[in-house]
Amino acid sequence: MSTMLEVSGLTHQYGQGERAHVAVRDLTFTIESGQLACIVGPSGCGKSTLLRCISGLIPATGGSVRLHGDEVSGVPDDLAVVFQDYSRSLFPWLTVAKNVEFPLRWQKVPKADRKRRAEEVLESVGLSGVGKKYPWQLSGGMQQRVSIARALVSRPALLLMDEPFASVDAQTRGELEDLTRRVQRELGSTILLVTHDIDESVYLADRVLVLSKSPAAIVADLDIALPADRDQITTRESEQFVSLRSEVARLLQSPQVQRTGEADTTDAAHAAGESGDAAGARTDAGSGAGSDRFTETHGTAESSDETATARS
């Protein structure tokens, strides 16, 4: 198994001088090809900042991130991100099919191939027959499936997921967790998923990284030796699952995790959230092209995209 992602001494600081806040400090870990790894930690500990540094959306202020051995200095072409807030990352004026095809347009994929690949990936996430609908006509869970489909359509080497199921109800959450594991196994994808939900991290992952409070540091790296075939009821009732869940829970309550951070994370987290939402559609696209357009306001993006849609 080869190394897909290598994070070495990663540090990110918001601001300068007295207002400086270190969100993550000196993080080092690797993710192997084909792994599904979860990062779990307290709210505000820097999990989303870490993901944005890995994706190239924001630069690290120290250390390095390498994908396939190449240092990440911008958003890599073969990386995609699924954000938590699907309602802000999907284009409401585009149909489901056009939303999913969007990354392929930047990759100059022919129109017929775009349509075929969008249909295939929509079928893989259980959304056959909804391509002509608009996101606002779908339930929250279905909208997040569209976000996942859009991320997968470009066949990324690495898929980053930032608390992707936090905005849906418990039943839908379970369905999306099972969908993620199924798609990951079928496609052989490498996935790094951030969550603050202990049960979700253990159920989904081959491996769980536990972070401390901000500035985030890795306090544990656990192998999750559960069977590959998992079930929301049987797996969660098993002694092995309960034991692993308890281990993660104890770690999250440990002094190493609960130590006081250097500063209040609220402002930094808010700034990071605004940055991530504005760039979410662009990162789902997985392409480095047109980055300035994607970080503009929704109104500007809407105008430019309507023009592009009319041409296709």
Image: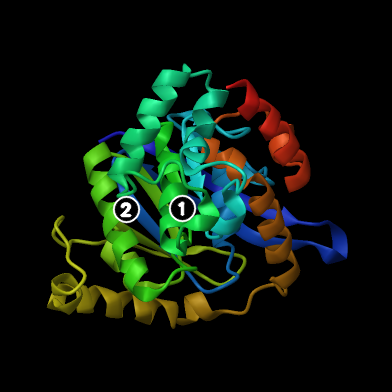
Q: Circle 1 sits on which residue?
A: 161
Query: For the residue carrying disc 2, how many other residues have a C-alpha within 10 Å: few (<14), some (14-19), or many (20+)?
Result: some
Under circle 2, the secondary element is helix
Under circle 1, the secondary element is strand
Looking at the image, residue 231 sits to the left or right of residue 146; the answer is: left
Where is residue 3? Give x, y as percent. Answer: 35, 36
Where is residue 105? Give x, y as percent. Answer: 54, 25
Looking at the image, residue 99 sits to the left or right of residue 57; the answer is: left
Looking at the image, residue 125 sits to the left or right of residue 285; the answer is: left
At label 1, the amino acid type is: Met
Residue at screen point 56% across, 54% down: 50
Q: CA distance from mark 2 to mark 1?
A: 10 Å
Query: What mark, if any, has residue 196 been given in the picture?
Result: none
User: In the rendered image, is residue 292 in sight?
Assistant: yes
Residue at screen point 32% across, 48% down: 125
Question: In the rendered image of this protein, does residue 146 appear above or below residue 265?
Answer: above
At label 2, the amino acid type is: Thr
Residue at screen point 58% across, 50% down: 89
Query: For the residue carrying disc 1, how many other residues have a C-alpha within 10 Å: few (<14), some (14-19), or many (20+)?
Result: many
Q: Circle 2 sits on which residue?
A: 180
Asked if marks 2 and 1 touch (Cβ < 8 Å), the reply is: yes
The C terminus lies in which quarter of the figure?
Answer: top right
